[in-house]
Amino acid sequence: MRIAFYAPLKPPDHAVASGDRRVGQLLFRALEMAGDQPFIAARLRSFDATGDTRRQGRMARLAQRVAVRLLTQWQPEPRLRPQLWFTYHLYHKAPDWLGPTIANALGIPYVAAEASFAPKQEGGPWALGHRAVAGALRRADAVIGLNPADRACVTPMLRDPARYHPLLPFLDTRGYVESLMSGRPPRLITVAMMRRGDKLTSYRLLGEALVQLLDLEWTLDIVGDGPAWDDVVRALAPLGNRVTYLGALADTAVAAALGGADAMVWPAINEAFGMALLEAQASGLPVVAGESGGVSAIVANGETGWLASPGDGIALAGAVRRLLENRDLRLAMGRAARDKTLRLHDLANAGERLRDIIDRLRPARAA
């Protein structure tokens, strides 16, 4: 099936790396593994960070012109025409102004992956995007949920709750090797972008937690870069020379850094689910993280790592201390983490799951 793939927040070939871009790329590959032919339908970014209603209106009008242009290209050419529209990451700050219009015009299924719906935004500065998301969800033939925290608000918006299909977060596990955990002293690692907001809040909580552990031997590698670099360095300054900043790394270098570590730690303030946490587990690392969003869908508390209440630096520090003081526990949790990732979170599993979901839509397309 020829699938029009669209990511209104950030296209999968965007120049700036992020977890969002990474998930988009993985979904694209999973669709290919499912036997379909996805292509990037448009690179129009509808994201509005500030709640600028005039900008949102302009974006909606621009999107309608783009939709008309695409339909003009596709309608006379059956070989170019998509047979399904697939939107990744749909929410009020980045609504899909294209997909529902084009799916209606072509009479094809409309699918959204990782959609969220926030009722509290109904009368707020993103009200226009909020209404667009509500309309897209009502139009959707299937919604694929990677973050279980989104389900409660999304399902009531669907014409049929059975149109919601959970999908475990996933990655290509072939790119990760199991850590030997031979570091002396133990090496902690954090992989996260450095931007203001929740990421910076997480870095600050990381510093507050780890400063409670200066009586133990350990080091910390930080993989990441961004506009809040100076703020992050200040937040971690009390940790002294225990911290090594590796900067932004390519995917293969991130995998290598994880393979040389002993445990991942990240407060995960308002994290959707945390691709870096999944990468760490694929590398056989136990994870200590804040239990926010869909993090618990990746980290099995007490089995593959420890989860602390969101924002609780004392609990986070206590969990890290348990791992630092018990190498056998680190090894056991690391093995369990890698085993769980290989069994449940691999790209091949996601391809099979997507094939199953999309196969259900083929009769509707034929009709």
Image (tube, rainbow, N blue to C red):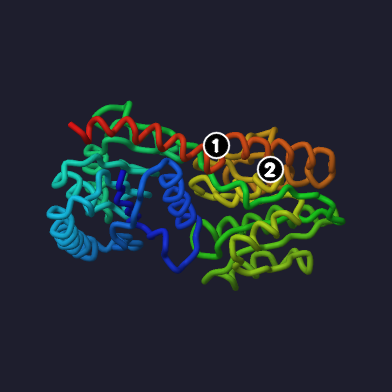
Answer above or below: position of 37 versus 354.
below
Circle 2 residue = 315
Point out the residue furthest to the front here. Answer: 79
For the point 50% across and 64% down, the residue is 17
Q: Mark 1 falls on what kind of element?
A: helix
How far is mark 1 from mark 2, CA to CA?
Answer: 20 Å
Instruction: Give the residue type at disc 1.
Output: Ala
Q: Which one is closest to the eye, mark 1 or mark 2?
A: 1
Q: Is residue 360 left or right of residue 256?
A: left
Residue 128 shows in this picture:
no
State which quarter of the image contains the C terminus: top left
Circle 1 residue = 297
Give the percent coordinates (x, y) of residue 168. Answer: 50, 37
Of 61 and 182, the residue lying toward us: 182
Give the percent coordinates (x, y) of residue 248. Answer: 59, 68
Q: Is residue 162 left or right of residue 273?
A: left
Residue 231 shows in this picture:
yes
- The image quadrant of residue 164 is top left
For the point 38% across and 60% down, the residue is 11
Of 12 and 207, the residue lying toward us: 12
- The image quadrant of residue 188 is bottom right
For the point 48% across and 50% down, the residue is 26
Q: Is residue 227 left or right of residue 211?
A: left
Q: Mark 2 falls on what kind of element?
A: helix
